């Protein structure tokens, strides 16, 4: 991954982080506003308190000012010394001249004019008129120390610390939260991929195992069937010799009947071994060039006969490509599939026999075969509207001797044989099924390009 | 502010009640004080002849103010009443006065008679310093400063109410009996 998209993603903060930062900023701003408001309130309160003291002094000192009584004025003013906030207090006569007062660190202004001129930073000067019957006879001036910056800051430092910590905690939490959720998303993405890969691997292993199983079963059963076939032939030959030996004696005698029964049983056994050999791809095939549509067309009557009245048959034979296969076996296969379809529709239904020309670059879904070769195929599909199969049945459908039919009704070799024949002929078999909807069995035979 | 004429005012301003200068300064201070008492004292309505009647300061006997009292009271008003100054002989019956000044140097018996006559009436009697007799307010000289005593009990008898501010400023106060 290049760095550009990475950087882009980094800058792309989640709304949660932005929200949290905004909340932190709002918190800080609110704190500052509150501090400023408190400060103003405090200043106003201080000024108010000083003004009240000045008013009290002005009211009580009136007579002393009128009678220019410095001593009495001084007594009144000195009463304010108990307030450490006050830097200076002074009483001025009507002409602005100082009558009485005190001053701490600051110098006491000797006239009212000077007092108003010397107001400075760190002080507030409050002047209140001394009046008698609506006429001003003097002025009281109080000078109070405003709180020093350090003390003001010290007063708010706790709150500021708390607010800052709150904001920091919010920021850190939101950042870590965002990082966590990013990690979690990444993890879940990776996890999903892991699962996908595991599933793929499982499917591949399954297919491999299935293929190995089929191979092993095929070889085993094929070997047995081959030897068995030879034995049957020996028994059959000996039976023939026995019949010849008995000659006409055997006719209409129990011995003849025994030989006849044994011979029939041997025929059945031979047929069975033939089917096993077909599944194990060891049957002798005589491939011929054939068009599946033509083949199916020729089978229409037979199929109709086999499936009975209750099943409606539709032929959609659009395939034009030819393929190479054993015609007899292919006929068997089609018939077999039609009969399977009928068995799936005991109450009747619809059977569709379809041929198509398809060009495939990858195997269709539900493909049972491995090692798919992309290319042109002549496809033949047998579609029924029967009971369908659950997945686990569908997956085992081509296993030899696997059958859902009642005991004695099927050998479980029909689809196995079909599968074996198709593979031996270089084709593929796909089974799609849905319970209650029906089954579609598709045979893909490689196109034979040699002919017309 | 060294403009000769208002030297007195300057002295008054700087050293109120200080008497280290000529004896006339003492009376200049007293002349200034007399009208200043007025705002701190409440007279009953029956002290005046009528709503538009003047507020009269009566200086009995020898005039020691040399016009200073008239100057100090000029243009003043006591509530709805214009303040005026009348100079009367010591023996005169001080009628229609709201404030009477009894200077030193007069006949003590005559002064006592006046004080007795004013007793129970809404009239503030002011006696000069160094006198054996005392009115509602009596001037005293203390440390070369003009100050005053107040007989609040007598004021109470006369139906006068004296502001606590003025009482607080007094040299000595004879308290009115507690009700």
Image (cartoon, grey):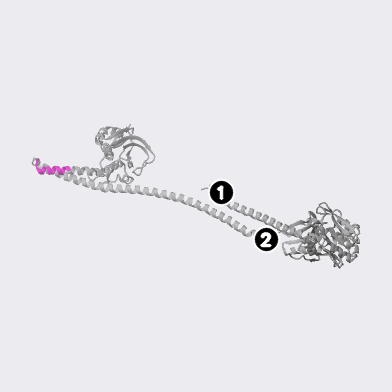
Q: Mark 1 lies on which chain?
A: A
Quarter occupied by residue A66: bottom right
Numbered-mark total:
2
**Position of B120 relative to A257 (above/below):** below
| Residue at (67, 61) in percent of width and height | A151
**Magenta span of residues:** A251-264
Q: Is residue A73 visible?
A: no
Residue at the disc numbered 1: A11
A446 drawn magenta: no
Residue at the disc numbered 2: A151
Expressed as whole percent of the image width and height from the top left, the position of residue B4 reads 91, 58
Q: Do labels 2 and 1 share a chain?
A: yes
A259 drawn magenta: yes
Q: Is residue B88 visible?
A: yes
| Residue at (68, 60) in percent of width and height | A150
Q: Mark 2 lies on which chain?
A: A
Expressed as whole percent of the image width and height from the top left, the position of residue A138 reads 80, 57
Q: How crowded is mark 2: few (under 14 residues within 10 Å), some or many (20 or more)?
A: few
Expressed as whole percent of the image width and height from the top left, the position of residue A329 reads 26, 38
**Position of A341 relative to A143 (above/below):** above
Q: What element carries label 2?
A: helix
């Amino acid at each position: 991954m290049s760095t550009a998209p990475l950087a882009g993603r980094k800058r792309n903060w989640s709304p949660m982080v932005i929200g949290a930062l905004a909340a932190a900023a709002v918190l800080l701003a609110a704190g500052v506003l509150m501090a400023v408001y408190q400060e103003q309130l405090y200043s106003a309160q201080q000024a108010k308190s000083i003004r009240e003291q000045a008013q009290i002094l002005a009211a009580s000192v009136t007579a002393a000012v009128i009678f220019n009584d410095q001593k009495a004025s001084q007594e009144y003013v000195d009463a304010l010394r108990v307030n450490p906030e006050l830097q200076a207090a002074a009483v001025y006569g009507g002409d602005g001249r100082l009558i009485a007062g005190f001053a701490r660190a600051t110098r006491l202004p000797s006239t009212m004019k000077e007092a108003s001129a010397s107001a400075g930073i760190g002080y507030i000067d409050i002047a209140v008129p001394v009046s008698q019957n609506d006429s001003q006879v003097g002025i009281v001036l109080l000078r109070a120390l405003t709180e020093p910056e350090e003390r003001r800051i010290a007063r708010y430092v706790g709150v500021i610390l708390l607010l800052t910590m709150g904001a920091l905690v919010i920021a850190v939490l939101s950042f870590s939260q965002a990082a966590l959720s990013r990690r979690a998303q990444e993890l879940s993405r990776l996890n999903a991929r892991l699962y996908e890969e595991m599933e793929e691997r499982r499917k591949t292993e399954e297919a491999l195992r299935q293929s190995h199983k089929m191979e092993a079963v095929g070889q085993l059963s094929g070997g047995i069937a081959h030897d068995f076939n030879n034995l049957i032939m020996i028994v059959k030959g000996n039976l023939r010799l026995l019949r010849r030996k008995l000659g006409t004696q055997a006719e209409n005698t129990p011995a003849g009947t025994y030989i006849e029964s044994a011979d029939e049983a041997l025929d059945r056994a031979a047929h069975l071994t033939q089917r096993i050999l077909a599944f194990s791809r060891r049957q002798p095939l005589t491939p011929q060039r054939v068009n599946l549509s033509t083949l199916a067309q020729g089978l229409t009557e037979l199929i109709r006969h086999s499936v009975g009245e209750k099943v409606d048959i539709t032929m959609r034979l659009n395939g034009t490509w030819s393929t190479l296969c054993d015609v007899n076996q292919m006929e068997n296969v089609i018939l077999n599939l039609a009969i399977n379809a009928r068995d799936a529709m005991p109450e009747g239904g619809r059977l569709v026999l379809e041929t198509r020309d398809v060009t495939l670059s990858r195997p269709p879904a539900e493909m049972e075969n491995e090692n798919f070769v992309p290319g042109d195929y002549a496809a033949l599909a047998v579609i029924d509207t029967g009971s369908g199969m659950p997945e686990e049945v569908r997956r085992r459908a081509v296993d030899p001797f696997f059958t859902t039919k009642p005991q004695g009704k099927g050998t479980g070799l029909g689809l196995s044989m079909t599968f074996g024949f198709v593979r031996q002929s270089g084709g593929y078999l796909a089974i799609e099924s849905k319970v209650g909807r029906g089954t579609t069995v598709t045979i893909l035979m490689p196109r034979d390009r040699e002919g017309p | 502010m060294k403009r000769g004429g208002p030297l007195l005012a300057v002295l008054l301003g700087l050293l109120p009640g200080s008497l280290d200068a000529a004896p006339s300064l003492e009376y200049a201070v007293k002349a200034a004080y007399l009208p200043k008492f007025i705002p701190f004292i409440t007279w009953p309505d029956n002290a005046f002849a009528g709503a538009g009647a003047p507020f009269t300061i009566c200086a009995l006997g020898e005039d020691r103010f040399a016009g200073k009292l008239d100057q100090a009271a000029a243009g003043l008003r006591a509530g709805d009443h214009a303040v005026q100054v009348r100079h009367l002989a010591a023996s005169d019956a001080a009628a229609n006065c709201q404030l009477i000044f009894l200077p030193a140097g007069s006949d003590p018996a005559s002064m006592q008679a006046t004080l007795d006559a004013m007793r129970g009436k809404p009239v503030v009697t002011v006696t000069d310093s160094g006198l054996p007799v005392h009115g509602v307010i009596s001037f005293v000289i203390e440390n070369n400063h003009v100050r005053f005593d107040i007989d609040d009990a007598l004021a109470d008898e006369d139906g006068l109410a004296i502001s606590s501010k003025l009482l607080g400023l007094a040299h000595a106060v004879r308290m009115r009996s507690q009700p």
